[in-house]
Image (cartoon, rainbow, N blue to C red):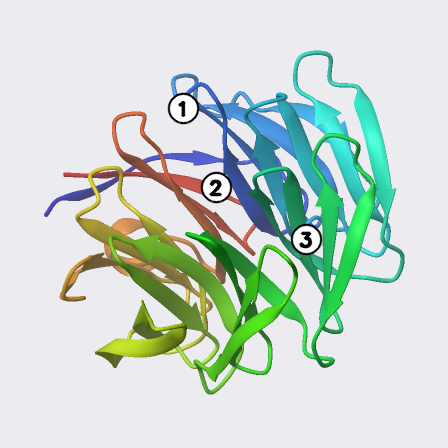
């Protein structure tokens, strides 16, 4: 496997916390501590365009492909909808005094993960709040829709499973520390967290069963995990400043991308996307930079 850093995008004035794919495979969006939402083009390096400016940090954003609206989470304020055609702010949903960590679309619902155990469920079309789902005080760090359930990772290390009727179906201690990211791979669910482990789960008879022994994957917390477009590889990004490439089925470690060998990031890696545009891997970091990686 050959790794090459083909570009670094600069321009953010603070840490980059969120990356999101666009409808056009060559485009993507970034956001972070400076409150800027920036559109980038992988075909035109380092020509970012600021499409929105929001006061405060942005930890999460999600593109609604049906409406062309980018849902952007403003910490301690709420969710804003940015029409990508006009760049107008078309709606705002107040969520005061909450840090917002993830947004997931589920049919006509939008589930929003935030601090102090709160999940807010919003109607996708009217943008009205439908329900508040709260289990404990631990922050809800990530969400993933799998089949007829939605899986939520919490800062107490637990993974909780909810039905579309907002009922708690199952809860399991998944990590010794925070659960930072979830991804579906085939018939399994993969979780990564603050304990620096990768865990693989099966969902059987309404219960989470560990499918593979936990892999100690990094030295520090794993903040992000993504699947390659071909479905054969995983990439993880960590607070230890490295990106690691794994075989998706058995978690064999294939490559370590770091600063000494590849000119990688100098600080924590917070977000990853693996673009369908020539299979480029994109990483965002506390060092305010976005790096683009060609992986052959």
Residue 161 in sight in this render: yes
Q: Against 232, is 116 above or below?
A: below
Of callouts 1 and 3, which one flags the residue occurring earlier in the amino acid sequence?
1
What whole-number distance in Å separates the C-alpha atoms at marks 2 and 3? 25 Å
Q: Is residue 199 left or right of residue 31?
A: left
Q: Against 13, is 188 above or below?
A: below
Of callouts 1 and 2, which one flags the residue occurring earlier in the amino acid sequence?
1
Classify 10 Å Cα crowding around label 2: few (below 14), some (14-19), many (20 and above): many
Residue in view at x 73 percent, y 12 percent? 86
Q: Secondary structure under badge 3?
A: strand
Classify 10 Å Cα crowding around label 3: few (below 14), some (14-19), many (20 and above): many
Classify 10 Å Cα crowding around label 1: few (below 14), some (14-19), many (20 and above): many
> Residue 231, how many percent across, how many down?
21, 44
Q: Which mark is residue 290?
A: 2
Of callouts 2 and 3, which one flags the residue occurring earlier in the amino acid sequence?
3
Q: Against 111, is 5 above or below?
A: above
Residues at circles 1 and 3 in contact by the CB criterion of under 8 Å: no
Residue labelled with disc 3: 112
Residues at circles 1 and 2 in contact by the CB criterion of under 8 Å: no
Residue labelled with disc 1: 42
Residue in view at x 26 percent, y 33 percent? 279
Q: Is residue 166 left or right of residue 180?
A: right
């Amino acid at each position: 496997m050959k790794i090459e850093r083909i570009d670094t995008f600069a321009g953010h004035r603070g840490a980059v916390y969120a990356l999101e794919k666009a409808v056009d495979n060559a485009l993507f969006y970034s956001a972070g501590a400076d409150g800027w939402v920036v559109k980038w083009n992988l075909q035109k390096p380092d020509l970012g365009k600021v499409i929105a400016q929001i006061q405060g940090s942005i930890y999460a954003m999600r593109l609604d492909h049906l409406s062309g609206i980018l849902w952007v989470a403003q910490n301690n304020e709420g969710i804003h909808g940015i029409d990508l055609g006009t760049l107008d702010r078309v709606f705002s949903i107040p969520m005061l005094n909450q840090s917002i960590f993830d947004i997931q679309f589920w049919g006509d619902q939008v589930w929003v993960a935030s601090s102090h155990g709160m999940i807010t469920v919003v109607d996708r079309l009217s943008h009205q709040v439908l329900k508040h789902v709260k289990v404990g005080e631990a922050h809800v760090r990530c969400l993933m829709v799998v089949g007829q359930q939605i899986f939520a990772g919490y800062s107490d290390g637990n993974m909780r499973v909810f039905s579309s009727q907002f009922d708690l179906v199952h809860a399991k201690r998944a990590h010794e520390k925070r659960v930072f990211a979830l991804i579906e791979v085939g018939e399994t669910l993969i979780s990564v967290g603050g304990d620096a482990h990768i865990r693989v789960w099966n969902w059987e008879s309404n219960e989470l069963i560990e499918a593979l022994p936990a892999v100690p994957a990094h030295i520090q917390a794993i903040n992000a995990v993504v699947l390659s477009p071909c479905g054969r590889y995983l990439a993880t990004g960590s607070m230890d400043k490295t990106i690691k490439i794994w075989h998706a089925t058995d978690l064999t470690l294939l490559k370590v991308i770091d600063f000494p060998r590849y000119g990688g990031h100098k600080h924590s890696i917070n977000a990853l996307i693996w673009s369908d545009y020539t299979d480029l891997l994109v990483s965002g970091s506390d060092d305010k930079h976005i790096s683009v990686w060609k992986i052959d």
